Image (cartoon, coloured by chain):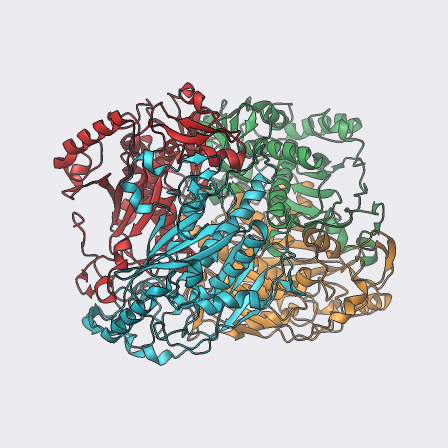
Chain colours: A green, B orange, C cyan, D red
Amino acid sequence: MSSTFGHLFRITNFGESHGPAIGCVIDGCPPEMELTEADLQHDLNRRKPGTSRHVTQRRESDRVEILSGVFEGRTTGTPIALLIRNEDAKGRDYEDMIDTFRPGHADYTYWRKYALRDPRGGGRSSARMTAPMVAAGAVAKKWLHQKFGTHVRGCMQQLGEIEIPFSSWADVEANAFFVPNRQIVQQLEDYMDALRKSGDSVGARLRVVATGVPVGLGAPLAAKLDADIAHAMMGINAVKGVEMGAGFASVLQKGSEHGDEMLPTGFAANNAGGVLGGISSGQDIEVSIALKPTSSVRVPRRSITRAGEPTIVETHGRHDPCVGIRATPIAEAMLALVLMDHALLHRAQNGDVSHEIPAIAARAATPGNS
Amino acid sequence: MSSTFGHLFRITNFGESHGPAIGCVIDGCPPEMELTEADLQHDLNRRKPGTSRHVTQRRESDRVEILSGVFEGRTTGTPIALLIRNEDAKGRDYEDMIDTFRPGHADYTYWRKYALRDPRGGGRSSARMTAPMVAAGAVAKKWLHQKFGTHVRGCMQQLGEIEIPFSSWADVEANAFFVPNRQIVQQLEDYMDALRKSGDSVGARLRVVATGVPVGLGAPLAAKLDADIAHAMMGINAVKGVEMGAGFASVLQKGSEHGDEMLPTGFAANNAGGVLGGISSGQDIEVSIALKPTSSVRVPRRSITRAGEPTIVETHGRHDPCVGIRATPIAEAMLALVLMDHALLHRAQNGDVSHEIPAIAARAATPGNS
Amino acid sequence: MSSTFGHLFRITNFGESHGPAIGCVIDGCPPEMELTEADLQHDLNRRKPGTSRHVTQRRESDRVEILSGVFEGRTTGTPIALLIRNEDAKGRDYEDMIDTFRPGHADYTYWRKYALRDPRGGGRSSARMTAPMVAAGAVAKKWLHQKFGTHVRGCMQQLGEIEIPFSSWADVEANAFFVPNRQIVQQLEDYMDALRKSGDSVGARLRVVATGVPVGLGAPLAAKLDADIAHAMMGINAVKGVEMGAGFASVLQKGSEHGDEMLPTGFAANNAGGVLGGISSGQDIEVSIALKPTSSVRVPRRSITRAGEPTIVETHGRHDPCVGIRATPIAEAMLALVLMDHALLHRAQNGDVSHEIPAIAARAATPGNS
Amino acid sequence: MSSTFGHLFRITNFGESHGPAIGCVIDGCPPEMELTEADLQHDLNRRKPGTSRHVTQRRESDRVEILSGVFEGRTTGTPIALLIRNEDAKGRDYEDMIDTFRPGHADYTYWRKYALRDPRGGGRSSARMTAPMVAAGAVAKKWLHQKFGTHVRGCMQQLGEIEIPFSSWADVEANAFFVPNRQIVQQLEDYMDALRKSGDSVGARLRVVATGVPVGLGAPLAAKLDADIAHAMMGINAVKGVEMGAGFASVLQKGSEHGDEMLPTGFAANNAGGVLGGISSGQDIEVSIALKPTSSVRVPRRSITRAGEPTIVETHGRHDPCVGIRATPIAEAMLALVLMDHALLHRAQNGDVSHEIPAIAARAATPGNS
């Protein structure tokens, strides 16, 4: 339910933005897999705050401790508990907001649901809660790669009005925006500097791709692979839209155009985004997500007090002016978690199915996936 | 898992397009609610095939039988089993396709996953499997309306390149396309007639709205209301994209624009689509979905045989040239199922929470919701 | 939850004793398994009423119809829906009881929980609801036998004060009591005739055994195999006690006696009942259950009316004077369902684990299992 | 699944006997409940090792840290993570056993399932893993008491051949055996001293009782309250048998004797153990469990090596000679967890059910419950 993600490869998340610690319990991981904290730290470092002036300046090392489930460097098959201590929880930033609500923020809904107002920060609704998911996702990425050769990668496709042409996956790791095009980085830096000065925030669009995904993951009706991917993506903080393959563009397509033709050498295109009838086709999994602008802005906005009186809110404190900038490792992690979960589900039911001919190849239909 | 949808209000779906029957078991329904088959038939009739020349001509009465869980016209709290006999399952339409795969269809992935090729039709991947979900959704709609005054309504927003301006909800029920604008119906008829003649199909975009939703439904992380809505929507046949509120448009928005301001009289806008931090805000739930064009088209397409040899596929038989046309009642049902499930989850955990002031009003920010 | 049993091999049960039909949906069954209605009917016939004068005289053919999930005699991997029409639902037997409660019966608790009083019979609490579980169990038995050579068998060990010495499994199928000793059948017939005349009922103790169970099923803490077996057994109507292996006798044992010694040829005994640390050991799974006497007796008992006034209840109508008599096929089915579910769970997580030496043999430590 | 216990009030357990820490995440707890570490420590102290010479001499303070889910002394409704550091993990005690298996121990099954042999101790199979469950159970006990006035209490009923007559609940807390009779403590001390000298271990029988349980908890078929209690109890380390109410004694009972008569003042007896048809009746919940003797004994036993060769095993190190001695707080905790989970489930579905007359009183039918 609420804090547990997945069916067989299950991540139970805990913690709050300004509490003593955050973390998760990973249940259902196969045994005998080599795993150390270093395997998790790489993606945690990609996500952590303070990596550039364009993200929150909160200082967290996000150093992860494995508390269980690993013995002599290998998974034991029992729960892997991960602990990350919060190091820079400056609660006072938010204290002046305790009696009102930020427009577009979960302040109001948490208070209505739980009768709770944590004056120290976003509490459970903070994007900080994605750190344990990123660590868990690193486990899934490693397992998927070892087992199937799967690669899960993401990048930013659009920042506000700036669309980013794909150049190469290598470029993605060479900048703090995770953009696949190093030529555009300076433009983004300038754009963000101006935005920060204006006290405002902006949205973004990201893409996540998995290559080397086996055919057959997912199941009809309530366990469709794309449905579970949509659940995972829409569950990421600030996400307001999810597309598979051609996505909303498929509204304009004809059937003769949308359906990816099949050749003995592979699929001729990838409008499907790697899923047909809720089951992976062997094509690349292609996901696109929209992230809204951060709701904590310095620009004054109209709101109400807890007593229902009108007021004006300006949010100071340390916030990401574009929450999309740090979201690439998060989206990768969530996709990896879904794929690993479904790989386990698939072999549970269909482990004995064999076929006379191999699956056809996935042909790269999108830039950079070859 | 695969065939069971929901956490507490749970729908277990069964059947195939061309088997003897389809249906579902609804578990977890509160007792003492008045319920008859007539309550379910209305939405089943809205979804059923053969209602116009623009959808499949398969003839199914989709008459539902309640097998259990209702006694003397009231729910008993025990499972409500629903049965719909298939009446017009003409398997031979498909027999010539048994040895190949339709581009864009689940033929291939089912065969890879289950070693199964049902020559009688789409089997479990058929949109016919949504009929039991529509029936179950009618139960949820009725309960939500009695309990909270919730209304769940949907309409078509776009058919291929034709965008449909919103006129009124009343118009929706007055045409076979579920468009909220009766002026545009003739244009759509002509468009579809031409499309059918060309042997092709086209995509569509739908909108689903719930008004009167209580504040507080949903929970952080893995049980976010919008994440579960995305799961439900992406699980509908042919859906390739899901948006909440401003959706992909929020990429271009500034934070000062996106965050819905709060006034003592209610929210000033609805970019959120009714969900903040994964929890309902009391605003209308606003969802938009993209449906791809049907994959079964008469236009010749390249494909492969089961032996991996190249071939050409043309699909004849009875198909919807735009699967989006009949999808409005389906999308409504799926949204209703998610909302009722979360209403039960919410009172399980938070049934004792009380508040000193009432929630602020949801102000209509979208046409027709006032 | 309530009506769905199992984690991956999932049975969703529906129906009431006196409604139009009962049945279930089996989800998660592996594809390509040969399956016909005849495979299910054998165990349904063993369980059905009216097979001797010692059980209820209700006449039900319990003929099962497969509605989905099987194509051309093989499972498809999609849900298998089973339907059994009720044929002899004589509601009037119970009408005089509508305003009071039978001591020891679920009448009272259902009424309190659901505000429901179904005057037609036990409704959802009836042992009739075990028929679909028996049918589903037959699927599990077949799969387990084909996959591992597993046999699941049960027998009666005690009827009231009469303990039944084990003679042979062959004897079990040769009498209506499922006793493993044909010498004792006449004594049981006489005992039951006298009991029936007295208008009373009596308890029973059953044993269920699975041989050929692979090592490794079950998982620590919340998914222990024996815990799930206990859940399944205690969930059978009238069961008040469950034992694994030595059971309550292990209270008196010393550790040096209880722990089953291991020899290169196998385990030297089976106090464990086939489970160590919640995981199957390769020994036979040995379960023993206690069933209470039926609560519907002709002997007058003190009770209250719905208004809380004192009254006297005598139950007439068609009841099993010993519900344990027909429970053997039910207990077998429930054990088979748990084992199959765990076999799927095990290969999901541990499908890649390999070992240098084979498991040691299970040596029969209990009569008749060699 | 494996490490998560419960449906709505969910405990995800992690850790190993000799790893750095153990703990759990409690999900689904209602908000606004006062909670501090002191609330949990009381039961943790009752369970912890080293409290007398009759239990393991391992020294653990079992001090619990709340990492999340509590703000300013009240639950927030979000996950409560609990951490207990292992302080006295002397791995070398076990090193000589790494190549063989203790008869009756999970050594063998863990190795077969996970290809894992943790030479430091029982790892995940250790009774140490019950500490987080005891802490979580303390939360449930507190909530149940505040909400319904429920009391959950346990005691030892039998130690090996010594049956313990019930004297008073007050006596239970006055001795290290949790026996409800202080007269018998010296006899038990002598018995255990002799047993320890002999290098052997022995079984025990415990009783757990909940008073003040509301009517209506539990649901038919797969969510029966007694079935979930049986699951919880059989999942406790070393448990081999579970009884509700009259339990195995009901085999010998007649229906006219077993069914608890109902009077306007309450039930006249409690053979049911508080559950009828899987739903709580308002009678006391009465559970009895059998615990096997500890498998780690100094007495030499026959076993095999990992290579399958015969060998002799003697287990030294720090072990409980009767695991039942410390199990009373564990069994109480597990019962409390099940009851709270079902209380939440019940109000989810049946929160609107109202009745014209109150439930009848539960009359104490067992010593000490009045």
Dividing the image into 4 quarters, which one contains the N terminus of chain C?
bottom left
In the displayed structure image, the side of residue A11 where residue C177 appears, left or right? left
Residue D282 visible: no
In the displayed structure image, the side of residue A255 where residue D206 appears, left or right? left
Image-quadrant location for residue B65? bottom right
Q: How many marks?
A: 0
Image-quadrant location for residue D289? top left
User: Does residue A113 lie above or below D120 as drawn?
Assistant: below
User: Does residue C193 lie above or below C24 as drawn?
Assistant: below
Q: Depth check: give the residue in front, A317 or B139.
A: B139
Q: Depth check: give the residue in front, C221 or A168.
A: C221
Q: x and y percent of residue A336 in the render?
A: 64, 38
User: Does residue D214 lie above or below D136 as drawn?
Assistant: below
| Residue at the extreme left of the image, as rendered | D183
User: Does residue D183 lie above or below B241 as drawn?
Assistant: above
In the displayed structure image, the side of residue A80 where residue A152 appears, left or right? right
Q: Depth check: give the residue in front, C12 or C156.
A: C156
Q: Depth check: give the residue in front, D122 or B59.
A: D122
Q: x and y percent of residue B254 in the render?
A: 65, 38
**What residue is at 62 percent from the left and 69 percent from the top?**
B170
Q: x and y percent of residue B267 in the render?
A: 53, 49
Q: x and y percent of residue D317 in the render?
A: 36, 22
Residue C181 visible: yes
